[in-house]
Image (cartoon, helix red, strand yellow):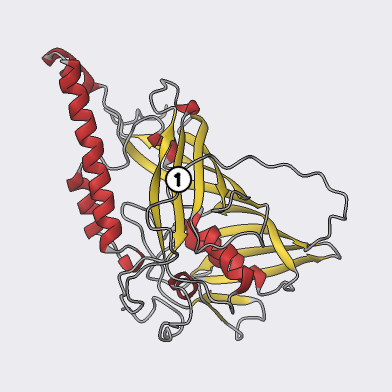
Amino acid sequence: MSHNVTLFTPPPLDPSKARIENVLELTPVLDIGPDVFTNTRPLWHPPGARGIYGGAAIAQSLSAAMLTVPDDFAVHSMHCYFVLAGDSEIPILYHVERVRDGRSFITRTVQARQRGRPIFTTTLSFSRANSGGKKKIEHASRKPEVSLPNDPSPGSTRPFDDDIAGPFESRKAGVVNNLSPYPEDKRLRRFFRVRGKISNAGGHQAHLSALAYITDSHFIGTVSRVSNIPRFTSTAELQKALNALKNPSDLDDEDIARALKELKEEEAVELRRRLEGALSKAAVEEKKEDRREVGMMVSLDHSIHFHNPWAFRADDWMLSEMESPWAGEGRGLSIQKIWSSDGVLIATCMQEGVVRLKQDEPPRSKI
């Protein structure tokens, strides 16, 4: 490990905590200021990404802000902007600004910096528990009827000291309107949960940070997937990206094997479709010419509305449903709803990002 990956030497993993708690642990930097924190451990650089996994910056910024807020307040909204790609080999400093402390609401801003430059910024609002009064307006989108994965028990049987175990796991849960010719009609469903059991000491804050971490997974990719454009067009391309990982500590063999398996399944479906359709050679060649491949995919902004901060556990299965109502001008928008295992709508998220396709011709010079 390079000496400058983290500002301080990381302590041993705490076996009483879930892996996600260790991944998101922060260390105060009192020499700089009372509300400045840094990542205790190295951060993950996903395959094919320009920088660190965005969910880490989101979750650690939330964790930093919560360290300055009383326990009877919980985050209800978080609006984020990804400014620059984060480098997994350089420590991050999270600067928290106490914007406002009111009776019912508290506001914080957090700026994540590397080498003195902002790479991520967010504004968060917290509300006091039970501050809405006895009379309330209440409604929520219902959880789709989707069966839980076959292994409903929380966590993983993988030993804790296995350094390649990722902090959370996911399972596909189907696609709604998969055969629709309109990408905006499709809904992608997936189950998520963190590995292990979140500690009692972590409180609701640990579950909220874990949820924030997970919300960035598969999110902007919704834009290309509803249009049947894979992020990686071959197993070789995916494997090349995996081999280029700077810090694969959050991606384990099980996750890699599942990604390869899913990609092979998608290729098999495409091959079967060609055979069953008895496409002519000319049609096949025409299809190759019309093939669309993702050239660039980068998140620009990310927002989370936390609806029921105390009504879920991130180490239980949560159902996510993602859709993309719009794409154009080299950008795309994704919306995500997340329910707890018992059907409570716990969060609604939105993300916009740059989604550009590989071009057949180089861009024309500006005149």
Does 241 sit left or right of 126 as displayed?
Answer: left
The quarter holding residue 234 reads top left
The quarter holding residue 276 reads top left
Report the amino acid beneath label 1.
Ser
Image point 87% across, 55% down: which residue?
133
Does 364 sit left or right of 120 as displayed?
Answer: left
Image point 23% across, 49% down: which residue?
260
* Residue named by callout 1: 147
Quarter in which the N terminus is drawn = bottom left
Residue 202 showing in the rendered view: yes
Image point 41% across, 71% down: which residue?
90
Residue 35 rendering spot, x and y as whole percentages? 66, 76
Q: Residues within 10 Å of mark 1 (few under 14, many from 20)?
A: few
Residue 119 showing in the rendered view: no
Residue 83 rendering spot, x and y as whole percentages? 52, 54
Secondary structure type for disc 1: loop
Q: Nearer the viewer, residue 84 or 355?
A: 355
Quarter in which the C terminus is drawn = top left
Image point 36% across, 77% down: which residue?
160
